[in-house]
Image (spheres, helix red, strand yellow):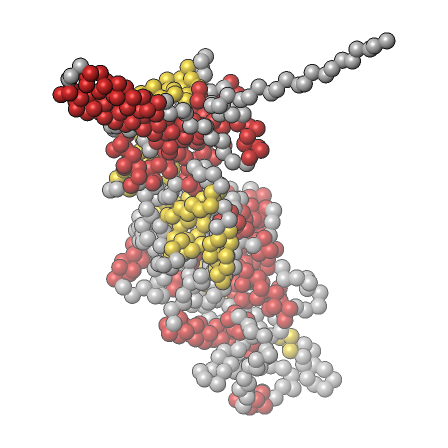
Amino acid sequence: MLTKQRVKKPPMPVRPVEPGVHQWGYERVQSGIAPTLKPKPQDWKFGVAAVPPATGVAVGAELLQAAAGAVAPTVLAAGVVCGGIVALGLRRKERAALSDRATEDIASLVSTYLTRNSLKVLRWSGGWLGYPAKIRITYDQGAAGNATLREELAELLSDRVGMTYELVKHDPRKRQLVYQVDPGAEEIAAEEDQDPLTERVTKIATKLFSAPSEDAPRIDLEWENEKLSKVHVQHNIGMNLTSALVRKDKAHKFSVQIPGRWKVDWNTEEDTATFTLRPDLPTFIAHPPISPMVGTPQENYKTPLRYGIDETGEHMAWRPWLDPMMLIVGRTGRGKTVVAHSILTELAARGWLIDVSDAKLIEFIGYKSWPNVRCVGAILEEQVRLVHAALELMQDRYAQIVNGEAEEDDFQPYCLFLDEYALFREDLADWYSEIKQQGEPAKVPTSRKVNAVLRAGRTARVHIVLLTQRPDAEVLGSGEPRLNLSCRVSMGPLDMDGARMMYNNPTAGVAVPTNIRGRGTTRNEAGDIVEFQAYWTPDPRKAKEPEDLAILDGLKPAQTLHPKMKIVLPTSTFGEPSKEGMSQELPPTYSEYANARMVPLDYEEPDDTESDQEEPGRDTDLEADVEDTQISTEVTETEPERSILRLVRAGDPESSETGPEKMPPTSRAKSGESLASVSDLRIRQKLEEEDSAEEEPEDGFGEIETLRIEDIVPGTKVLIDEGEGIWGIVADSMADESEEAHWVIACVTDDGADETIVAPEGEIFPIRKQQ
């Protein structure tokens, strides 16, 4: 029996893809290259090929009819027709190629497939070959969710054709967009070629203020003296800008990526944002004269104390009734002492009681004779006494309030200046280890006393202005004392850690120009972080020019309300005589220094108390001989270097040429007069050094190294122009909004000019990090 076998039919062939349509996604993945359209068939070639046979037939017919005279015109006409077909065919070919390239450019945005149906040129203009004057683009449903589809299409068309396109019609139902060339686009394009800034601003503003299914923003630029001064944006994303954080983020991105310092005015009712270039700050501002005080210091307590101006002309001021303590930081030579001088003169003019702890010996000695400055402590023992005096004043005023003897408004305001606080703390520790006696605290109590005043001084109207080079947590501590240093000023550039400590913002104050003296960062009355130029307040000791003397005349108080005081330091005492008849010398304790007497400047000790206590059995003649025959000892290289303050406190005045001459330990604590003479000698030597060599500000940046642009952080110096040797401090950095795989960093040069660097990711730049 025969069985039938089923024969398998061959599989149906896969339907070939149409010649003009490619599966873009598949081809892209497989080939790794951008898809292309196959050129259209050139039909005009068939017309050219048909002309010669037709011409031959016509010529033959004319010869048969004995019309030989018509042969030449026929051949000529055939040539013209052939040339016309070729010319039109070539133009059609070039236009088709341009259209295909534009279609390929937009394919990934509008369709899954590469098809000529995506783009159609509705009108050509501009001469023989011309350019597409009007284009219709059809997009798939999946592309409708692209928020920046319209802007990206316009940008791609403009890049391909070389003209500027604008959207004139959008039909969401048919998913069609119609673009046409702007009127006068050739002139506009030529201007943009000459001014890349216009193109960059337009691109960035368009991306920042675009949203899905909304028209592109309208952007108008204003120029002043050939410099971009204002950017006005009319947008349609008002609902997206209701959050202040969103508005702040967009303003920040714009300011970083466009050269210059910009402020923005938001109009949420009319959906506009206007970016205005901030004016340049002056590099010198003399301290304005202070009007004579009217009334009492208590009545003038809530007068703002001015110390500088920001770019809007607003006065930067300390308001002690709101921010009870002030912190001024900055490296040597950046202007923090000048700011302190400005504050001191403002306080003195309002009748405040002022004490100064002058840790560097010479920064405030010019104010020893200034009205209402009670005492300037130059040596450490005096500075310790001033700290305790501030604490005692605060405690006494609290007691008066508790006992009902006074109210807060009854107290005259008081301020203690603590210069170079970090150095003060270091020397305190060394000094205390030398004088500490049994039963006294293990650590020097002075820092705790300062913290107590920082914490509770406001109610008693006892205030502190603290100066230091870096806002380190180790120096300033944490908690309430640090928080009460709420008026904060930084002079010169900060590093990122310092910016966080000062303003809780890693980029605040990191890009202050290094070549402009008196330029710093602070908060204005509204609490915004701003750059400012400090007033120039001359040092009375150094002022010799007529301009400086005139400034000081305008600042000097008209009334002297507080007498000058001096500190009488304790002297050594002697214990009971031993069996051998000798008494042990007992140097002053910390408590005795902390409670040293403060007396009027012209006070003199009575005759019966001027002489030193004489130790029983003590041979004073022998000691005098020993003092007269002291041997000068050179400081060896192995001896650790000591600061100016420690040299003074150890009684080590330098001799003129032979080096430091060591004084006997007993002479250090004999009397306040001996300490004062040592201080005066060291001050004179310091002044001589200053006269011989003017102190230069520290640069604060390390050796040159290299980094990729995306790794450069704010506060770093970067080489902007190698040929000119121009460096700039990085204010901020971020990915470029206008160009993919690029990075942008905003810089401020040493002279205060704003620069923007845009480079591909991975590009290497020479940099210098802050030390």
Q: Position of residue 423 (x, y in %)?
A: 54, 63
Q: Along the horizontal axis of the image, is 728 left or right of 70?
A: right
Q: Position of residue 178 (x, y in %)?
A: 37, 20
Viewer-nearest residue: 735 or 78: 78
Viewer-nearest residue: 250 or 87: 87
Q: Is residue 551 above or below residue 138?
A: below
Q: Along the horizontal axis of the image, is 109 left or right of 311?
A: right
Residue drawn at x 43%, y 72% is 686
Which picture quadrant has residue 77?
A: top left
Residue drawn at x 56%, y 45% is 483
Viewer-nearest residue: 706 or 2: 2
Q: Along the horizontal axis of the image, is 502 left or right of 364?
A: right
Q: Position of residue 468 (x, y in %)?
A: 50, 57
Question: Is any part of residue 93 visible from this angle?
Answer: yes
Residue drawn at x 31%, y 48% is 291
Q: Is residue 58 above or below residue 611?
A: above
Q: Is residue 690 above or below residue 697?
A: below
Q: Is residue 552 above or below residue 760?
A: below
User: Looking at the image, which residue sits at the far left?
Assistant: 69
Considering the image in quadrants, where does the N terminus appear? Answer: top right
Q: Position of residue 56 (x, y in %)?
A: 26, 21
Which picture quadrant has residue 267?
A: top left
User: Looking at the image, which residue sits at the far top?
Assistant: 1
Viewer-nearest residue: 103 or 769: 103
Exactly how many numbered labels are in the figure? 0
Residue drawn at x 49%, y 34% is 34
Q: Along the horizontal axis of the image, is 543 left or right of 104?
A: left
